[in-house]
Image (cartoon, rainbow, N blue to C red):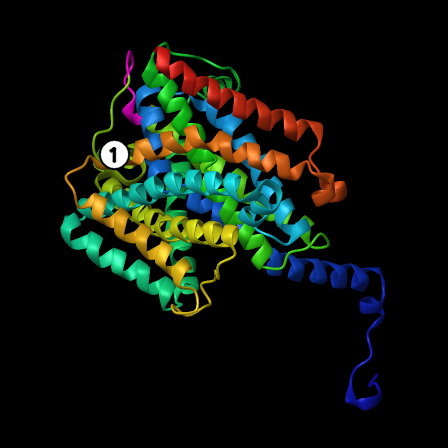
């Protein structure tokens, strides 16, 4: 029956319980689409050049023996990312803002110095990934690095980054090839599951360094600043936070799953019985995909590595610029013009230039990528201490402070990484 005004009346089905259900479902689904993004983008960017090479090295050298470290670090990632997103939603501010307000200028300078050092080496590592992936396609780094660095500068400064981000995220899905490859290899699942939950140790400084690097590449300092800034900038509030929480969980679990299969494939294809095998060049890591792609393994690996490296080579310098500018009250936004936010774009430009220039030197690409993740693991406890002080402040967070479980996990992580770093002095 027609309604007044030329419309249509709701049918009995649309007015009944099913109609109510679908209207609620549509409402929640649209809210989810509006909020989703920060957690998944940040987590996928975490599997960057340094991450892929570090996981590959862990599997190639030590087989399944570091899977339990990945299990723990993935749990820590989920908790820490959720803490950051919650702080962003409750306060509407970035992590740097909160550090300055709570701890003052001196401690803010210290925190920003830690962030700058960690992010500079991570940026260098991602340019190493760009160079290494394109060298597989026989493109010299003296050609690829200047061209790509100019492109990365232009897409941010000229405002075309969002479209590039979607394209690069699609390329990063090439890492799902590790999942397929891991299934094809028919691993000994009982042994794998045991390795995921039962700690094993190999005496020596190298094993400790790889442990620290696995944690440092799974939970990086830059992720916390970037995620919280994205949540705050997107206007996510306490009311819509439950959707963002799902976004964070999905992103963190996806990161852990991909990392798990990278280690698994590397262990099954590169680790020899009776000893590990080292990775000297990116091409060595690509061999983990041979059971899936055959002689095209290098191309598949190079494509995924290039997408992840370029994505992170944009995001990590951006997270640095956001963090430092927020800390000291300078204008910060990719939506601004160059002259409207000179410090923001100046920092971004400096990191791109330094990162690109370093890789033009005769350096080992794999060593650069691994060292950056090791350094992240060393510096991560500093950022976690600042975060724990903020997220447990009832004046700041109200009823949204951490529960005991979150605090225990984070403090064990801080103590564990600090203890491993000290242990290296005596190994």
Near-viewer residue (197 or 159): 159
Could you tell me residue 208's position as x and y percent? 38, 18
Residue at 33% x, 47% y is 309
Please indicate whether residue 105 sits to the left or right of residue 261 in the image: right
Near-viewer residue (163 or 232): 232
Could you tell me residue 78's position as x and y percent? 57, 36
Whether 70 is among the magenta residues is no
Please indicate whether residue 393 sits to the left or right of residue 161 in the image: right
Question: Can the viewer see residue 380 in this picture?
Answer: yes
Name, please, the residue furthest toward the bottom: 5
Q: Is the magenta region chiefly helix, strand or loop?
A: loop
Near-viewer residue (324 or 194): 324
Classify residue 13 by image quadrant. Answer: bottom right
Near-viewer residue (406 or 129): 406
Classify residue 347 by image quadrant. Answer: bottom left
Picture layout, residue 286 above or below residue 147: above
Question: Label 1: which residue?
Answer: 366
Picture layout, residue 75 above or below residue 61: below
Whether 270 is among the magenta residues is yes
Could you tell me residue 40's position as x and y percent? 51, 48
Question: Can the viewer see residue 65 in this picture?
Answer: no
Picture layout, residue 215 above or below residue 125: above
Quarter placement of the N terminus: bottom right
Could you tell me residue 327's position as x and y percent? 51, 50
Residue at 21% x, 44% y is 359
Badge 1: few (under 14), some or many (20 or more) residues near its Cα, within 10 Å?
many
Q: Which residues are magenta?
A: 268-275
Residue at 26% x, 43% y is 128
Residue at 36% x, 10% y is 426
Please indicate whether residue 299 sits to the left or right of residue 70 in the image: left
């Amino acid at each position: 029956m027609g309604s007044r005004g030329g419309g249509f009346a709701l049918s009995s089905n649309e007015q009944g319980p099913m109609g109510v259900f679908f209207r609620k479902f549509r409402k929640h689904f649209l809210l989810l689409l509006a909020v989703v993004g920060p957690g998944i983008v940040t987590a996928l960017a975490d599997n960057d050049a340094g991450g892929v090479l570090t996981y590959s090295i862990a599997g190639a050298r030590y087989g399944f023996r570091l899977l339990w470290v990945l299990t723990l670090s993935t749990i820590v990632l989920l908790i820490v990312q959720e803490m950051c997103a919650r702080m962003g939603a409750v306060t509407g501010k970035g992590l740097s803002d909160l550090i300055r307000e709570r701890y003052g200028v001196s401690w803010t300078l210290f925190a920003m110095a830690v962030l700058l050092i960690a992010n500079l080496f991570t940026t260098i590592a991602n340019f190493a990934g760009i160079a290494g992936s394109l060298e597989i396609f026989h493109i010299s780094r003296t050609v690829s690095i200047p061209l790509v660095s100019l492109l990365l500068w232009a897409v941010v400064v000229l405002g075309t980054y969002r479209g590039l981000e979607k394209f690069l995220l699609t390329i990063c899905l090439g890492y799902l090839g590790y999942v397929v490859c891991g299934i094809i290899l028919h691993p000994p699942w009982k042994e794998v599951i045991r390795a995921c939950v039962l700690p094993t140790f190999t005496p020596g400084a190298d094993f400790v360094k790889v442990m620290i690097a696995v944690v440092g590449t799974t939970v990086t300092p830059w992720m916390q600043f970037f995620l919280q800034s994205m949540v705050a900038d997107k206007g996510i509030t306490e009311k819509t936070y439950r959707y963002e929480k799902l976004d964070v969980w999905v992103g963190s679990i996806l990161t852990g799953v991909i990392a798990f299969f990278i280690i698994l494939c590397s262990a099954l294809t590169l680790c020899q019985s009776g000893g590990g095998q080292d990775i000297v060049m990116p091409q060595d890591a690509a061999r983990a995909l041979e059971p899936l792609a055959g002689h095209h393994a290098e191309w598949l690996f190079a494509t995924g590595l290039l997408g992840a490296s370029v994505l992170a080579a944009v995001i990590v310098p951006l997270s640095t610029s956001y963090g430092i500018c927020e800390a000291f009250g300078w204008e910060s936004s990719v939506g601004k013009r160059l002259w409207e936010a000179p410090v923001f774009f100046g920092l971004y430009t400096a990191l791109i230039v330094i990162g690109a220039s370093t890789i033009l030197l005769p350096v080992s690409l794999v060593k650069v990528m691994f060292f950056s993740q090791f350094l992240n693991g060393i510096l991560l406890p500093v950022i976690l201490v600042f975060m724990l002080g903020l997220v447990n402040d009832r004046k700041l967070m109200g009823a949204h402070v951490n529960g005991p479980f979150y605090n225990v996990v984070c403090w064990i992580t801080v103590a564990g990484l600090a203890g491993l770093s000290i242990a290296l002095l005596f190994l």
